[in-house]
Image: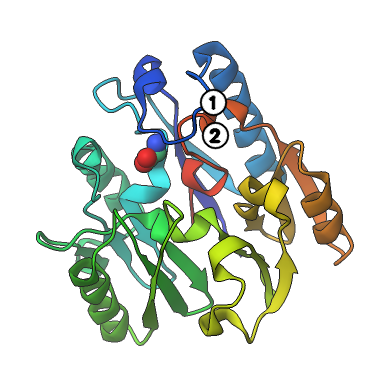
Amino acid sequence: MFTHAIVKKPCHTMIYGITTANLGQPDYDLAMKQHAAYIDALQQCGVQVTILEAEEAFPDSCFVEDTAVLTRKFALITNPGAPSRKGEIASMIPVIKQFYPENNIEYIKTPGTLEGGDVMMVGDHFYIGISARTNREGAQQFINALKKYGMSGEMVPLSTVLHLKTGLSYIENNNLLIGGEFLENPAFSHFHHIEVAAEEEYSANCIWVNGKVLVPAGFLQTQKAIESLGYEVLTVDTSEYRKIDGGLSCLSLRF
Ligand code: GLY
């Protein structure tokens, strides 16, 4: 169960966020409305939400998930692989220190890079995507930290997606939303697969929060598949974040 979430309001410069999406520039005002609805959905799941102010110097800074990994036993401060995002860490460290004692905070150090979007938590085991943003050195540093706290991790090389959780979401009870390049990956064969249709691939990024599942609005096949497993689904429109390669998980840290 999660008790807390951390989010950061989108900044006006989000319209210049890193993107491969070809969907046009985000509408800032609509993004703010969608952010408020996202916070409301998290609150409906029973978590206390810490809302950080926007940081104009960093267009992608609303995607707080990439700056930290918050486990049951320790917090990891990451080192984003995207050069324009490295500075996002500075303002996150004091926030994380409000929730974790200093000696339970670990740091990814250069030349290691790691972004939280590449980390999928399954209990005390963590899958770590090796991507354009997360390198093997960063993943190994994280695995070493996990071992120190009696937890474990493994690396999963990515071929096409931005982050691991662009194409996978663990929604508990052995259920894994899975699409695209991961479908045949033996690392995930022991999960119950909820296959995400190619035309709905964006909806492979959902989040489980205390028994409910947040699903991006407009992806009915995925929504129905999750509902058929007995989950209550809350839909949240993330159209403006999709334009800058962002999804539901990217917008919060849940712990
Ligand atoms: N625009 C989100 C990212 O590329 O990190």
User: Would residue 67 be seen by someone viewing this image from the given angle?
Assistant: yes
Q: Residues within 10 Å of mark 1 (few under 14, many from 20)?
A: few
Tell me which amino acid carries mark 1: Leu
Q: Quadrant of ligand 1?
A: top left
Name the foreground residue: 33 vs 80. Answer: 80
Name the foreground residue: 24 vs 56. Answer: 24
Quarter of the N terminus within the rendering: bottom right
Q: Residues within 10 Å of mark 2 (few under 14, many from 20)?
A: many
Label 1 – label 2 distance at C-alpha: 8 Å
Residue at 29% x, 54% y is 133
Q: Is residue 136 left or right of residue 221?
A: left
Q: Is residue 16 left or right of residue 48?
A: left
Q: Which residue matches tag 2?
A: 242
Residue at 30% x, 55% y is 132
Does the residue at mark 1 contact the one at mark 2 (Cβ under 8 Å)? yes
Please say if 129 is above or below 92.
below
